[in-house]
Amino acid sequence: MTDLFFDSQDNQSPVETKLFGDLIAKVAYELDSEVRKQLANRFSGGEAPRSLAVAMANDSEIGIAGPILRRSTSLTQDDLIRVVETRGHEHQMVVTQRPDVGEQLSEALVVHGDDRVVASLVSNQTAKVSDETFDKIVDRAAKNPDLHRPIAERKVISPEHLNRLYTIVEGPMRREILERNAEFTEEEVERAMRRAQTRVAVVNGTLPADFEKVQAEYNKQKGSNAINRSQLPSLWRNHETTKFMIAFADLTGLDYFQTALLFEKKDIDTMAMVCRAANFERALFVTIAVLVLGNEGLSQAEVLGNMYNDVPPEAAQRAIRFMRLRATVTAQAA
């Protein structure tokens, strides 16, 4: 019967094709699963009667559904979305590998799939993923390192999402991200900045009890040019923590919470990028980093200096723009 369909396919009307598909589907599901597997492989390479393709795509056995889900051109995006919403992760994984994954299908995969499904989707370079869906993907990456590499290696990604990933990952991957920043045109960066301005960053945190008093004191000193970045190490050594954080934030364009988190985590890589973007002297960065690291940093001055030199200035400037933007939007929302 299947041979008859292929032999007469060119001469069939749409109505005849539908009737034939309905008949094959009915007969196939009255026989054992091995017959359906053979049918799935036979029809997987191109067009199949739609009713048959939909039935096999929803089959509970992945050996039957898989070939159809992966390659059949008879399935619409809505057909695939329904499969993603009603079937398990095995079916979803196969769907992520299709060459025609659209934005709505990507969204369904992220909403209903696990992180393994999301990683496979991101690794599919032909899949179309909206900015809103990619927001959700990067949010999940903050909790699962297995998503870091697929996102970092995605060819189509906005500067905003790549720089959000920078704040999540550690080690050599950060260098890769900085290098990729140089690939973006100014127009792409501006477009991403405009979009980021529509997203309000909600900062969860509590200001220290002396914040208002120290902020007023710092503003007075700044207004009379009585404080500058060269005094940052002294503030740290004197345990003037609140004033140090306020000063560092002001001198780099970050906000207090971003700065406090940076030093709480002892995130030296990001610290180097921030200092590089703010044109801090190499020696000043090394001094601050050594103070933050304590005894651990005493023997690493040369390594820290090289780390600073290795940060590409233009890439640092581009990455820091997104951190500064979040600080600005947060201040406006407060």
Image: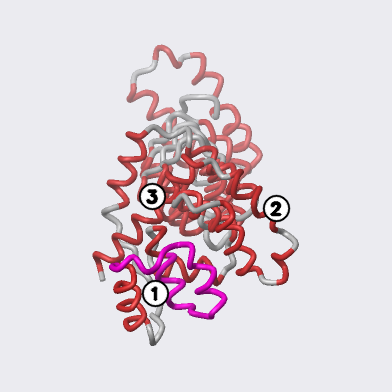
Magenta stretch, residue numbers? 223-248
Which SS does the magenta portion mostly show? helix
User: Which of 300 and 319 lies nearest the eye of the viewer?
Assistant: 300
The residue under the point 48% across, 62% down is 230
Q: Which mark is residue 321?
A: 3
Q: Relative to 72, does residue 117 appear above or below in the rendering?
A: below
**At label 3, which amino acid type do we have?**
Arg
Number of marks: 3
Is there a contact, CB below 8 Å, between mark 2 and mark 1? no
Q: Does the stretch in magenta take in 26?
A: no
| Residue 29 visible here | no
- The answer to whether any part of residue 74 appears in the image is yes
Of callouts 2 and 3, which one flags the residue occurring earlier in the amino acid sequence? 2
Q: Of the residues under marks 1 and 3, which one precedes in the sequence? A: 1
Q: Nearer the viewer, residue 291 or 253?
A: 291
**Which sits in the foreground, 46 or 263?**
263
Dot 2 falls on a residue whose secondary structure is helix
Q: Report the residue at 39% width, 38% height from top.
A: 102
Q: Residues within 10 Å of mark 1 (few under 14, many from 20)?
A: few
In the image, residue 241 lies in the stretch drawn in magenta: yes
Q: Is residue 149 above or below residue 228?
A: above
Which percent across, then down, holds residue 41? Answer: 60, 30
Within 10 angstroms of label 2, few (less than 14), some, or many (20 or more) residues?
A: few
Name the amino acid type tagged 2: Val
Give the image location of residue 10, x and y in percent: 42, 12
Place of residue 16 in the rendered image (x, y in percent of width and height, measured from the top left): 37, 23
Q: Is residue 316 left or right of residue 334?
A: right
The residue indicated by pointer 2 is 303
Q: Which mark is residue 204?
A: 1
Query: Which amino acid lies under the numbered mark 1 shown in the image of this protein?
Result: Asn
Dot 3 crowding, Cα within 10 Å, few <14, some 14–19, many 20+: some
Looking at the picture, does residue 90 appear above or below residue 49? below
